[in-house]
Every structure is written in C-alpha cells, then in structure tokens.
Image: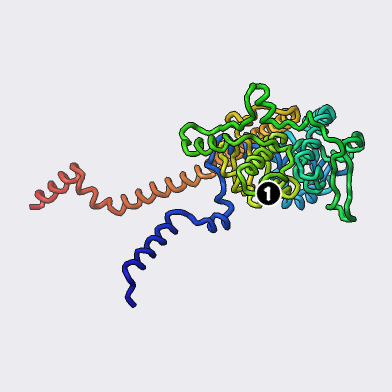
Amino acid sequence: MMISKRVFERLACCYCRLHSQPSFIYHFRNFSLWSTKKDPDLEAALSRNRRWIVNNQIKNIILRCPNQVVPLEHLQKKFKTLDLQGKALNWLKKYPCCFEIYRDNDEYYCRLTKRMIHLVEEEELVKDMQEPVFVQKLAKLLMMSVNQRLNVTKLNELKHSFGFPDDYIIRILPKHPEIFRLVNNGWRKNSMEIELLAWNPDLAVSAVEASAQKQGIEPCFSCSLPSTWIKSWQRFEEFNAIPYISPYLNPRGLEEGSKEMEKRIVGLVHELLSLTLWKKSSIVKLSHFKREFALPEKLNILLLKHPGIFYVSNKYQIYTVLLREAYNGSELVDKNPLVIVKNKFGDLMQEGLHEYNQRRRVVNLEKKRKCMNLMKPERRKVASSETSNQDDNGDTLGGLGRLFDPEERKRFYKVLFDER
C-alpha cells in the first residue's frame, strides 16, 4: 500500500514531537519525575532530617512503653511502619549515644541513654513554654480553613511538622474553651473536628504581610533563584505583579482556575509552610486538606510552576515541598526553640554514629591484620616449595651443567688428548 508524501510527513512530525518532549500523560503516570532541579544544599537538609525523623519515632515508641524499656522483638515489628529494612539491633547499634541495648534472659531490650533522657526533659520544658505559640498556630490554621473547622485525624498527620505535642488536644483545648471546641458529627473516630469559636484579627496576618510591614512595602513574594534562571524570573515577576491575596480571606468570591485563585493558593501554602518547624511538608499530607483549604486537585503541578518560592523534592520517594526563602544553604534562617532542642538530638546522633564508625574501622583493621598474619606462613611454604623445585631441577641438569664449567672443560680435553 502506497503512503502519500503528506501523510508520511505528518507521521514523521508526530514521531519527533513524541520523542523530543515527554507527554503530559507520561508525567502524570510517573509522579517520581515531578521534582524541581536538584539543589545540593536543600537536598542535604532533607537527608539530614530523614535519620532524625526515624530516630525520633523510635524515641517516642520507647517513651510510650512501660518503664520506658522496649523489647527489641517488639521494635523489629514496628520497623516496617518506619520504612526501614534489616535488623533493629544493627540500626540501634549505630547510635550508642542515644539508645542503650542490654540483654536479659536471652532477650534484647532497648532504652534511652542518660544524655538522651536529659534532652527529652529539656524538650518537654520548651513545649510547656511554647504553649501560647501552639494556641496561636492552631487558631491560624483554623482561620485559614473554609469553615473554621479541621479534621483531627488529618491534623494529626502534620502535628509534628507544626511542633504540636502528641497530647495537644488534651493540653490546649480544655484551657481555651472560649477559642476552640471539639465537635463530633458522627460516631466514628475520624469524624471528630476542632472548631474555631472566636476570630482574632491580630492573628489574621500572614508571614508575607508581616515581612512587608517591617520593610514598609506592599506584600509580595520573594524569589530565591539564581540570576541565570531568566525564564523562571520572568514568570515570577509576572505572577508577583498580581496583587497579594491573604490566605485568611474567604475564597468563595474567587473564580476557580483564575490567577487570583492561584495567588491565594500559593499564599496559603506559603503560610502553612511558615507555620511548620522546618518550613517544609509532605505534599501528599497537604493534599488531604483539599476540602478544608480549597486546594486544587493537582497541588503538585501548581507548586512546580513556582520554583522561585517552593522547592519540590522526591528524595526517598517522599514528595516534599520546602520554602526556599527560609533556608540559607542547608541551614534554617530562623530557628524555633523546639528546632534548637531537636538539633541537639541530631548532634547526639552524629556523635554516636561517628563513634560507631570509628569502632567499625578498628574492627576491620584488626580483621585485615589477622588475615595478613595467616597469609605469611602460607607464602613462606610456597616460597620454600619453589626453591626445592629449583634445586631438584638443578640436580637433573647437573651433568650437562658441568660442561659449561671452565675447569671441567679443561679436565675433559686433557683426558681426551692424553688418550690419543
């Protein structure tokens, strides 16, 4: 069958388009490809937090156990929920400054070290001092929601990101009945919600607005991209030209899909990240609040459109959004008192890890030394066997070898001519 030239050219054009740029469907199905261009400093900050998060969860498991001692067998079962593989014993041995392992009745147990217990006590003191801050944060979160209500189950997923203690409902709500109320619309546990009773206009000021007031300028976002990103800078300036919309304003008057609605969503995510301890959050967990905060269905696509404001990473297959302006290199610009205490925990972890690596290095050197000592006698045996073989070969060639000796040759010729 003959194919016309025009049809062939169209097919060639479609082929080139298909293979030159990945299709939208391909990106949609492969979410792992969705991330901002790698920033080594911010990636280092995320990897540093990863170990801390795991060990902090182990610490909380130990604190919840009777006498703050956990059987290693029980901890091993929890490893799957921590996204860890291998033996719990091997992981805990890496952090001897944080976790103490001992054996009793042929069973291993784990508890916190004395230094770790001191840090836990210090953290509790800071949490008590930070209680007014927790009240403000919770009120601001409720003020940003559409109906001034938030689901408790969803909020629990982000409670550690905001710095809330595990018992924040018992600790905060009963002390402030004029501000908060616990509502249960059904008999199910996941239907429980926290409702805001009193609107505080002093709290309805975002981090962007507060910064603008200090500088005496109009509220606007800041861009933390290199000057070489020309196209991204142009898009940012076009977006920043749209008047800032406070996340505390009711979005019902805004048209869905409009530039104003996009401005409001970017401002809301910016404010949510500003309220977190490390100015970062899981995109999946943020997406759970679509109804409460009127977030778009494809939040990740919107965040990727603003690389000057947000940094999106898929490190450890956990899709995280991070506020660029909050970091100087890999370090936070403004550190919450809770972050300072938690950083001490991180330093203790690193100290233990360094001690573990030094011990492993000594053990490996000792193993190499023993192997070398075992190899020396074998080498000597091989060398002696080679010399004996050479001697044997020399004896077999001894008769011919004498012919090449000058004295032997003289003697041979003398006897030969004397006989003549």
Q: Quadrant of residue 252?
A: top right
Residue 353 falls in which quadrant of the image? top right
Quick check: 44 above or below 215?
below
Q: Amino acid at mark 1?
A: Val
Query: Which residue carries the number 1 mark?
Result: 284
Q: Position of residue 351 (x, y in %)?
A: 67, 31
Along the line of sight, the residue nearer the viewer: 145 or 340: 145
Answer whether residue 117 is visible to the viewer in this image.
Answer: no
On screen, 370 above or below 80?
A: above
Q: Is residue 260 left or right of residue 385?
A: right
Residue 187 on image: x %, y %: 90, 55
Q: Secondary structure at mark 1?
A: helix
What residue is shown at x 56% (from left), y 36% (from top)?
308
Residue at coordinates 64% horizontally, 29% vertically from top-left?
219
Taking 123 as reference, is 269 above or below it?
A: below
State the residue in front, 150 or 47.
Answer: 150
Other-residue count near label 1 (Cα within 10 Å), few / some / many at <14 / 14–19 / ≥20: some
What residue lies at 90% left-to-right and 34% top-to-bottom?
176
Q: Residue furthest front?
A: 253
- Work out whether residue 202 can be spotted: yes
Image x and y of residue 235, in percent: 52, 39
Q: Nearer the viewer, residue 392 or 53?
A: 53
Q: Is residue 6 left or right of residue 22?
A: left
Location of residue 275 by image quarter: top right
> Residue sitting at 59 percent across and 48 percent down?
301
Residue projecting furthest to the bottom: 1
